[in-house]
Image: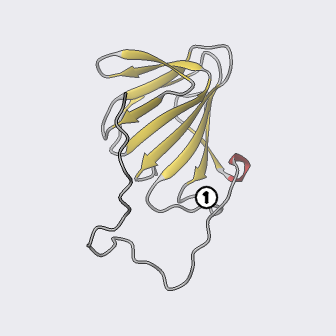
Amino acid sequence: MAKITAFTSYQTGKPPVIPKPDHPVDPHIVTVQDGVPVAYPNCHGLGVRVVHPVNPNAPAKNFGLVMFYIPPHALLPPGSHETEETYVILEGRGRMTFANFQRDVCKGDFVHLPPWCEHGIENTGKETLVVLIATSPPNP
């Protein structure tokens, strides 16, 4: 059984990297339809930049959230980049290719990709593969 750790808050004794504003800040509440579509090279899937610097509806500065829709039999070829990512498989089944191995993924899987980790994904199922991609810093 996993040990449950206690949340200790964000108080570190150091000044914040991002200064606290003088006025209250409200959230951006958006849907995928409020996002900015993006096509990836050599891929028949489509991404939507939901929380991202290019989306005026939710202009994040330090990270990005992209909904990625991959139709059956489509793939995003392996590549790597300097940003750190996590793929969260929300719907469907697929296979991810890494530098040294491949792994099947399905709903509920979280795949953490350190900077420069080679990765690609293919939809091996019969339904659209839906992946939430969290990136820090955001991809250009």
Q: Residue at x 40, y 77 (%)?
A: 19
Pointer 1: residues within 10 angstroms few (<14), some, or many (20+)? some
The answer to which image quadrant residue 62 occupies is bottom left
- Whole-percent x, y for residue 128 in the image: 67, 24
- Up/down of 104 relative to 43, above or below: above
The answer to which image quadrant residue 73 occupies is top right
> Quick one: 129 or 10, which is closer to the camera?
10
- Whole-percent x, y for residue 3 in the image: 34, 36
> Quick one: 65 or 25, which is closer to the camera?
25
Q: Is residue 78 left or right of residue 82?
A: right
> Quick one: 38 or 101, which is closer to the camera?
101
Q: Quadrant of the N terminus?
A: top left
- Whole-percent x, y for residue 88 in the image: 51, 34
Q: Is residue 61 left or right of residue 3?
A: right
Which residue does the numbered mark 1 point to in the structure image?
Answer: 55
- Up/down of 77 relative to 60, above or below: above
Q: Amino acid at mark 1?
A: Asn
- Up/down of 113 relative to 32, above or below: above
- Whole-percent x, y for residue 99 in the image: 30, 22
Q: Residue at x 35, y 35 (%)?
A: 80
Q: Is residue 89 left or right of residue 57?
A: left
Which residue is outermost to the bottom? 22
Q: Is residue 29 left or right of residue 79?
A: right
Helix, strand or loop under label 1: loop
For the image, the number of numbered tags is 1
